[in-house]
Image: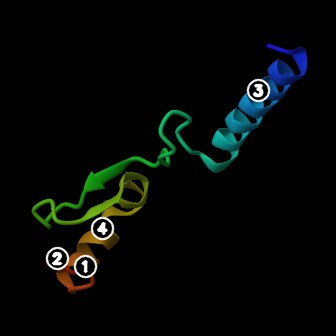
Amino acid sequence: MPAIIQCMIGFLMLLWRLCCKVYRVCCCCGRRSVKMMKAPGTAGAVIISRALFESNPAAYFTNLRAGGIHVS
C-alpha cells in the first residue's frame, strides 16, 4: 500500500477519534454516550437521561404527578 494512502488512513482515524471525544459519540457504533434509564413510575414506557433524573429527582416526580410526563 502506498505511503500516502497509509498516511491518509491514519489521519482519518485520528479525525474520527477527535470527533468522538468532542461530540461524545461512541467510536464503535456511533451512539451517544449519555446514560439512559427507564423512567420511574412509567412501567418502562419512557426512557430518560439518567443524569437529568439524578440532578433533581423531586422535580421529576412532581412533574410526573402533575401529568407532565405522558405515558402511552
In the rendered image, which residue does mark 3 sit on? Answer: 9
Q: Nearer the viewer, residue 25 or 3?
A: 3
Query: Pointer 4 and pointer 3: residues touching (CB < 8 Å)?
Result: no
Residue 53 horizontal/vertical position (percent): 35, 60
Q: CA distance from mark 2 to mark 4?
A: 19 Å
Amino acid type, residue under disc 3 in the picture: Ile
Colour scheme of the rendered structure: rainbow
Task: Give the mark nearer the N terminus: 3 vs 2.
Answer: 3
Judge by depth and name the residue closer to the eye, 25 or 40: 25
The CA distance from mark 1 to mark 3 is 47 Å
Circle 2 residue: 71
Amino acid of disc 1:
Ile
Q: Which mark is residue 58?
A: 4
Residue 10 in percent (x, y) is at 78, 23
Give the label, 1 or 3, closer to the camera: 3
The image's mark for residue 18 is none
Q: Are marks 1 and 3 in contact (CB under 8 Å)?
A: no
- The earlier-in-sequence mark between 2 and 4 is 4
Q: Is residue 4 left or right of residue 65?
A: right
Q: Nearer the viewer, mark 3 or mark 2?
A: 3
Q: Position of residue 72 (x, y in %)?
A: 14, 78
Which mark, by number, is residue 69?
Answer: 1
Q: Residue at x 13, y 65 (%)?
A: 41
**Category of crowding for the residue at label 4, using alpha-carbon neighbours closer than 10 angstroms: few (below 14), some (14–19), many (at least 20):** few
Element marked by disc 4: helix
